[in-house]
């Protein structure tokens, strides 16, 4: 017969990770866990815990093991079909909300939505907005739809590659995207949590700029004049993205930094279509 405390004495995972796994196994709050750490556990609970502990030791991301991650104060369900929402991407959402401040009932599209984190956070912060979200992966759209339903975010979902998904739709006030921007040769792809995430959400299998390029060069067809295009990108891609926006008729181009102070988001306003 074992308690949480007994198990904690044997695991080599950081204490916080152990607590998160226990919360997931027992479906309890952190406060409950601390108050009940000497309770006797059911054998199947102990077995379930150690199976997760072992997977974590092998490097699986915590978010996939517990099936959720917090983003913009909301809890999003995640699976290996979608990228795990990053704090860096909150920069994109905050900049988007700032730019949308003076636009009533804005039409927004999030290209390559994955878990839906960006689109749903925008919809929740701006209930008057009409938010669309796309993804080429049906599995990702399934996760995104589930999140929209659970969080009561009003988002319309469309399947397809970048603009293919929204062909023929009325122009938008804002296009946002966190596309795959890691170069295929980047050694990060073979390290840490990233190894378990969908490769197609991380890299364009090229230099990291090809999807950003595709999104920027075709955006004018789907943006209102004066509309905003806002993109997340790699820490070293700010200049390249600004240059692309300049070449394709955008003004008020600006790069924003993430919480670590790295260039992370660049946006601009379409001058004429
Ligand atoms: N920001 C992510 C990372 O560096 C990459 C996300 C992306 O390619 N869109 O891990």
Image (cartoon, rainbow, N blue to C red):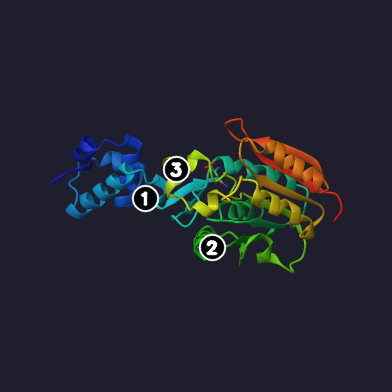
Depth check, mark 3 against mark 1: the one in front is 3
Q: Contact (CB < 8 A) between labels 1 and 2?
A: no
Q: Which residue is mark 1?
A: 65
- Please tell me which residue lies in front, 121 or 211: 211
SS label for mark 3: helix
Q: Image height check: is 191 above or below 156? A: above
SS label for mark 2: loop
Q: Residues within 10 Å of mark 1 (few under 14, many from 20)?
A: some
Depth check, mark 1 against mark 2: the one in front is 2
Q: Image height check: is 105 above or below 187? A: below
Q: Image height check: is 90 above or below 259? A: below
On the rendered image, what quadrant is the C terminus found in?
Answer: bottom right
Ligand 1 resides in the quarter of the picture at top right
Any atom of ligand 1 within 8 Å of the CB at mark 3?
no
Disc ID at residue 137: 2
Q: CA distance from mark 3 to mark 1?
A: 19 Å
- Could you tell which of marks 3 and 1 lies nearer the N-terminus? 1
Q: Residues within 10 Å of mark 3 (few under 14, many from 20)?
A: few
Q: Residues within 10 Å of mark 2 (few under 14, many from 20)?
A: some
Number of callouts in the render? 3
Depth check, mark 3 against mark 2: the one in front is 3
Q: CA distance from mark 3 to mark 2?
A: 22 Å
Q: Quadrant of residue 10?
A: top left
Residue 53: x and y, percent? Answer: 28, 45
| Residue 67 left/right relative to 22 | right
Q: Quadrant of residue 111?
A: bottom right
- Could you tell which of marks 1 and 2 lies nearer the N-terminus? 1
SS label for mark 1: helix
Disc ID at residue 190: 3
- Please tell me which residue lies in front, 82 or 182: 182
Residue 125: x and y, percent? Answer: 63, 51
The residue under the point 58% across, 51% down is: 204
């Amino acid at each position: 017969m074992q308690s949480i405390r007994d198990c904690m004495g044997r695991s080599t995972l950081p204490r916080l990770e152990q607590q998160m796994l226990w919360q997931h196994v027992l479906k309890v709050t952190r406060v409950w866990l601390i108050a009940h750490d000497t309770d006797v556990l059911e054998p199947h609970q102990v077995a379930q815990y150690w199976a997760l502990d072992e997977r974590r030791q092998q490097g699986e991301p915590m978010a996939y093991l517990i099936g959720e991650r917090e983003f913009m104060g909301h809890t999003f369900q995640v699976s290996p079909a979608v990228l795990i929402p990053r704090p860096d991407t909150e920069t994109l959402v905050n900049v988007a909300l700032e730019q949308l401040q003076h636009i009533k009932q804005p039409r927004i599209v999030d290209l390559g939505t994955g878990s839906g984190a960006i689109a749903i956070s925008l919809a929740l912060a701006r209930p008057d907005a009409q938010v669309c979200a796309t993804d080429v992966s049906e599995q990702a759209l399934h996760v995104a739809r589930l999140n929209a339903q659970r969080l009561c975010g009003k988002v319309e979902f469309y399947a397809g590659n970048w603009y293919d998904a929204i062909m023929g739709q009325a122009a938008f006030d804002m296009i946002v995207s966190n596309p795959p921007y890691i170069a295929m040769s980047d050694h990060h792809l073979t390290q840490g949590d990233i190894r378990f995430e969908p490769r197609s959400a991380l890299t364009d299998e090229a230099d990291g700029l090809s999807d950003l390029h595709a999104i920027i060069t075709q955006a004018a067809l789907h943006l209102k004049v004066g509309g905003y295009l806002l993109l997340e990108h790699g820490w070293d891609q700010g200049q390249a993205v600004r240059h692309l926006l300049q070449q394709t008729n955008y003004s008020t181009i600006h790069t924003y930094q993430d919480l670590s102070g790295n260039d992370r988001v660049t946006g601009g306003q379409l001058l004429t279509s």
